[in-house]
């Protein structure tokens, strides 16, 4: 959970930066709590002119339109942040009824409220292409769990990983590289339900 007062400071900062169209991936203040006190929105720090400029630049990336699969496939690893929108699918051989990403808030006697985030890697179908979503270090910014078949926006950095599941196999049957999206060193991967 963000530290006490962080959400209020982040809200004041966002109101000062508006109008900034964040699109339908961030339809309410609650969805912004998932990025508070991350590299996307440093709510724990006191706002300064410099932090507001950084926040504005990073939030513009969240307002960007999603790019098409051919444009994403042409990016070099490490390019980003980029916005992809597509349909979630489990990795081959995984339970298709299982949630792919979820958040739970629980009470612990010695700590208080704790946010527990559970995620697994999944495939994102974008314009007929498949992108491997590396969940490590990422955050779900909407409260509802992500299930197979959900349409989501994913914000992260382009990558290429060895194709261990055979989706990018060459005609000779040997695996190649697969397009992927991941967290960056400062900015975590974000996954948000698309609100229609």
Image (cartoon, rainbow, N blue to C red):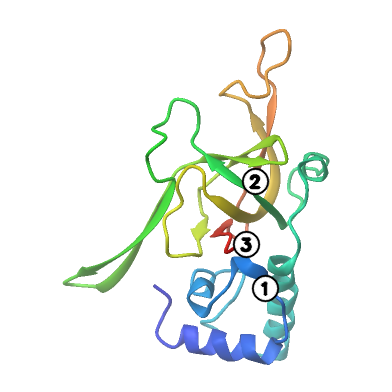
Instruction: Please name the residue shown 65% across and 33% down the image.
Output: 161
Foreground residue, 7 or 31?
A: 31
Q: Quadrant of the N terminus?
A: bottom left
Question: Mark 3 sits on what residue?
Answer: 187
Q: Residue furthest front?
A: 196
- Please give the label number shown on residue 125: none
Instruction: Residue 85: give x, y in percent of width and height.
Output: 66, 52
Residue 47 visible, this orientation: no
Instruction: Residue 106: give x, y in percent of width and height.
Output: 25, 66
Foreground residue, 46 or 12?
A: 12
Find residue 162 and report its image quarter. top right
- Marks 1 and 3: CB-CB under 8 Å? no
Q: Quadrant of the C terminus?
A: bottom right
- How far is mark 3 from mark 2, CA to CA? 12 Å
- Marks 3 and 2: CB-CB under 8 Å? no
In the rendered structure, the answer to whether residue 20 lies left or right of residue 151 reads right
Find residue 20 and report its image quarter. bottom right
Question: Mark 1 sits on what residue?
Answer: 22
Compare marks 2 and 1 and give the one earlier in the sequence. 1
Mark 3, other Cα within 10 Å: few <14 / some 14–19 / many ≥20:
many
Is 11 situated above or below 68? below
Question: Mark 2 sits on what residue?
Answer: 181
Instruction: Residue 151: give x, y in percent of width and height.
Output: 57, 51
Q: Residue furthest top?
A: 172
In this rendering, the label closer to the viewer, 3 or 2:
2
């Amino acid at each position: 959970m963000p530290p006490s007062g962080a959400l209020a400071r982040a809200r004041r900062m966002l109101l000062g930066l508006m109008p900034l169209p964040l699109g339908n991936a961030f339809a309410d203040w609650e969805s912004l709590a998932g990025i508070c006190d991350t590299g996307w929105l440093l709510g724990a720090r006191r706002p300064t002119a410099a932090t507001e400029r950084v926040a504005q630049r990073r939030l513009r990336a969240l307002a960007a339109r999603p790019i098409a699969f051919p444009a994403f496939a042409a990016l070099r690893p490490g390019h980003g942040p980029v916005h992809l929108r597509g349909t979630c699918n489990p990795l081959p051989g995984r339970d298709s009824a299982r949630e792919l990403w979820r958040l739970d808030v629980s009470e612990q006697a010695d700590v208080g409220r704790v946010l527990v985030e559970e995620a697994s890697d999944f495939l994102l179908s974008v314009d007929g292409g498949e992108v491997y979503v590396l969940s490590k270090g990422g955050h779900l910014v909407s409260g509802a769990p992500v299930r197979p078949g959900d349409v989501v926006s994913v914000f992260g950095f382009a990558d290429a990983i060895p194709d261990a599941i055979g989706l990018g196999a060459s005609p000779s049957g040997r695996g190649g590289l697969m397009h992927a999206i991941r967290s960056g060193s400062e900015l975590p991967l974000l996954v948000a339900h698309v609100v229609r």
